[in-house]
Image (tube, rainbow, N blue to C red):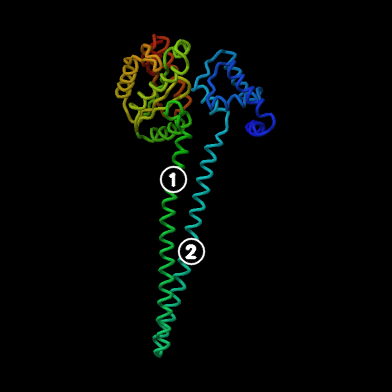
Amino acid sequence: MAEDVETTIRGPQAYSLAARALQLMQEAQVWPTALNYELWLHYARQPDGKLGRAIQDLLEFKTPITEAVSEQLAADHLPRGGLQDQIKDASEALGRELAAVSQAVEAAQRNQAAYGKTLEGASQGLTAGAEAPAFKALVDTLAAATKKVQSHSKTLEQRLAATTTEVDVLRNRLEEARRDATTDGLTQLSNRKSFDEHFERLRGLSQNGRGPLTLALLDIDHFKKFNDTWGHQTGDQVLRFVASVLARHGKSPRFAARYGGEEFAMLFAGENPVQVMSALETIREEIAGRVLKRRSTNEDLGAVTISMGVAVLRTGEKCASLTERADAALYSSKRNGRNRVSNAESLPAAA
């Protein structure tokens, strides 16, 4: 699908495809951002493809296509070509630098070996008791060889210094690419991929006796109604606000991520139930206690609340099972009035 679009936008049908994409965006009342334009180009080019069907489902059910929804569509259906190219280019450049260093080191080794042979020959000449002219020639040879080795050593030193700088640049580029691959673009929290990787690592530590691991799922209450009332851009502001609170309270060894849509997740490693519940109550109260205002008009948006579900990892339990229990606790919070924290362990008793 990506290749078809790339080919089309460089051919005679480019402008008609672009016009069709903009028409579809206008009909769906979607803002013509760069990401939306890319999505709708693919949709206009291949409406029966996976991305096209996903967009049609959203339109059929009148689901607001917010910035968050667009980013999820892109993550699910668009190739991460730019990111892959960054990693590929940085890796190739790093390979070239290492190859150059290897060649410089080999050249230095050859020069050192040649210099050793020169010294060995000089030693034999001195032992034989050379005459003055021969002795002068010997000294000239040693001086020239020494100068050559010094020159090559300086060249190698400069090459290594330049390579060190280049490797630092490449390391930063690879780190930036890694962050892009594991960060949610809207909220700047870790994304679902990063959460899955982090969970597996902490799960292994917990199962090996490094303390309990607790999962909390958090969902913004009545978020769809809020979007319908105030608009999607303001809804994105709310997502960023909630994410900023979670980021402050989710610093290592805790871990906070955007789980999808208006849902977030937090992992608590090595903390007991009292500590976890205290932290979640603090987060809930901080979010609910903030009166938000619309940036463009300064209108009072009222308070935003979140519902939470908590589950502690059991021995041998997989991510899917733990998530299912935390999700059940979350919906218990929703059913019982929202703006509260429910523990999966208490669900049978409550029932």
271 or 147: which is nearer to us?
147
Give amino acid for label 1.
Arg
Camera sees residue 318: no
166 or 62: which is nearer to us?
166
As helix, strand or loop, the secondary structure at mark 2 comes to helix
Q: What residue is pinned by disc 2?
A: 106
Q: Quadrant of residue 129?
A: bottom left
Q: For label 2, count other residues whose C-alpha is less than 10 Å away and answer few (under 14), some (14-19) or many (20+).
A: few
- Distance from disc 2 to disc 1, alpha carbons, whole Å, reads 25 Å
Q: In the figure, is residue 248 to the left or right of 57?
A: left
As helix, strand or loop, the secondary structure at mark 1 comes to helix
Q: In the figure, is residue 32 to the left or right of 333?
A: right
Dot placed on the residue nearer the N-terminal end, 2 or 1: 2
**Circles 2 and 1: CB atoms closer than 8 Å:** no
Q: Residue furthest right?
A: 12
Where residue 286 appears, as percent x and y from the top left, is 32, 18
Q: What residue is pinned by disc 1?
A: 171
Quadrant of the image for the C terminus? Answer: top left
Give amino acid for label 2.
Glu
Q: Identify the residue shown where x is 41% and y is 80%.
A: 140
Vertical side of 302 occupied by 109: above or below: below
